[in-house]
Every structure is written in structure tokens, then in C-alpha cells.
Amino acid sequence: MKSMSADRHIIRFAMAQPYLDREEELDLAIRWKNGNDQKARNRIAQAHMRLVIAMASKFRGFGLPLNDMIQEGYIGLLEAAARFDPAREVRFSTYAGWWIRASMQDYILRNWSIVRGGTSSSQKALFFNLRRLRAKLARGDNRLSEQAIHQEIASALGVSLADVQSMDARLSGNDTSLQTPVAGRHGEGTEQLDMLESDELPPDEQVSGIIDGERWSAWLHTAMTGLNERESRIIKARRLTEETVTLEELGAELGISKERVRQIETRAMEKLKAALTEVAPKAGKSLEMA
């Protein structure tokens, strides 16, 4: 009730604002543009609140509060008033319509669903025109298949068929909480979140991977003890760090040429391979592949 009362109050206020003739509108725009007259800007905006109300009513089908839609439209209206250039000799209503519509559409895209969508211009056109085009095509020929309707919409808006199908599915459903209980054979207390497929490995494979990793680390640590200080430094810098050090950088650090660094690295890798093959043949082959 409170929301409906607020809507009626805003609408009554908008309808009570007097119209501006062309000369008065131009005078107010010049006062705002040249003299930064805030009252002149507000006068222009208030006189066009009817335009905001009319446009908000066109978007009521998205199920968002009319009062919020009007407020967003008024923000767009003020932006238009701030940017309006009277030298272009166009009526303010023509210029403001774009800003009001854009502000409302942005609000709808932000709040219609918890999943953000329609960020590109083509996606926005699809979001706001799909229902209208679908209804128009259905009225024209009710024998059209779902695939044919989607294809017609894709051609009309210049988007892919997959985009149309995806958006249609989104507009046809509602957001569902992952905490929503799942009825049926899954058992009491099961939620939607419990039914999502995980990208992680099964627990037994995770444990197996951890064990293999620890075993490999122990083998490598033992094999590294057979390298001298310079060989160990080169292998660690070239093979055992996320950011590989270049041959040139190691050469400068050790006071040798990059070719000499490469030779030492090759020899050290052969030593490691031999040492690892003694304790674990598979580890030696893995090192060779690396």
C-alpha cells in the first residue's frame, strides 16, 4: 500500500507540472548552459516528468517497482538536462528520451536477475525486444516452430541463434537459490547446491595425487644431493621455480657465458635422471619427458 501511495504521489506531481513552450524551454536551457542556473535546469526536468512516467509504464512487464523505475528515469532526465545543448535546435523531449530509456534499461539489467547479463549493445537489444518479437511472430503464424521463431529473432536483431536460445531460457525462468531443498529420492535436507557437479577430482584421486607428489619430492630431494653447488643453483632456477630464470641472467650471476650455463644444465639433468632411475624408474622417465 505504501508503495502504491508513493507511485500515485509521484504521478500526481508529474501531471501537475506545466508544459513549456519552445521559447520558454530555450530560455531555460540557455540560462542553465551559460549561467549554471540550477533552478532553470530543475524547471526543465520537472516539466518533462510526464515523459518519465510514460516510459516507466512501458517497462512494467519486467516486474520491478514502478517507483524505482521512475526514480531511475528521473536520474536519466537530470543527466539529459545537464548535457542538453540549446544550440542544436532540437526539443528537449527528443534528446531526453534516450537518456531516460538508457537509465531505466540499465536499472532493469542490474536488478531483474542476480545473474548479470545483456552487457553488450546486441545483448541489450535482445533482452528488451525478444518477448515483443516472439509475440509478433506467434500472432503472424502460430504454426512456426520454436526453432523457426528463434531463427527469425536472431536474423531481425543480428545476433546468433545460440544467444537467442540462451536469453529466451533466462527470460522464461526465475532465479533459484542454491539453498532450495530438493524433493524426491535424494533424501531430506538435500539442497540444490549439493546437486552441482564439482570440477575437483574425486577424494581418492586427490589423496593419491598428494601421496605421489610427496613421494616425487622426496626422490628429487635425494637426487639433488648429488649435484654440486653451481649445478644445483642452475637446476633450481631453470626447472624448479614458477618464473624461469634465463640463461643470460644466470650467466651474469655466475660469471660464465650463457652457453656454459646451458652445458651445465644439460649435465645436471643427466645426473638427476640417472639418480632418479635408480630409486624409481618411472620418475626418471618423467624427468626425461620434462
Image: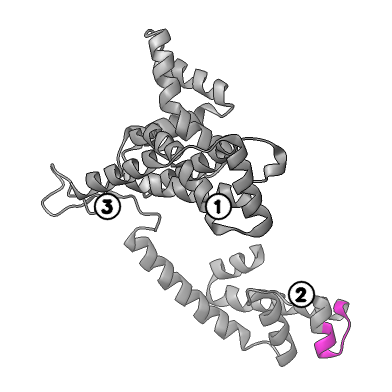
Mark 2 and mark 3: Cα distance apart in space: 54 Å
Please tell me which of labels 2 and 3 falls first in the chain. Answer: 3
Residue at (23% x, 46% y) in the render: 5
The type of residue carrying mark 2 is Thr
For the residues bearing labels 2 and 3, Cβ distance under 8 angstroms: no
From the viewer's perspective, is residue 46 above or below residue 54? Answer: below
Q: Secondary structure at mark 3?
A: loop
Residue at (53% x, 56% y) in the render: 39
The type of residue carrying mark 3 is Leu
- Please tell me how crowded label 3 is: few (under 14), some (14-19), or many (20+) other residues with Cα within 10 Å: few
Please tell me which of labels 1 and 3 falls first in the chain. Answer: 1
Please tell me which of labels 1 and 2 falls first in the chain. Answer: 1
Q: For marks 2 and 3, give the one nearer the viewer.
A: 3
Mark 1 and mark 2: Cα distance apart in space: 76 Å
Point out the image quarter for the C terminus: bottom right
Horizontal side of 200 relative to 77 (left or right) equals left
Of residue 97 and residue 190, the one placed in the foreground of this image is 97
Residue at (39% x, 58% y) in the render: 200
Label the magenta part by its dominant secondary structure.
helix
From the viewer's perspective, is residue 222 above or below residue 184? Answer: below
Q: Position of residue 69 (x, y in %)?
A: 38, 44
Q: Secondary structure at mark 1?
A: helix
Image quadrant where residue 251 sits = bottom right
The residue that disc 3 covers is 178
The residue that disc 2 covers is 266
The residue that disc 1 covers is 41
The type of residue carrying mark 1 is Arg
The segment highlighted magenta reads: 251-258
Q: Position of residue 6 (x, y in %)?
A: 27, 48
For the residues bearing labels 1 and 2, Cβ distance under 8 angstroms: no
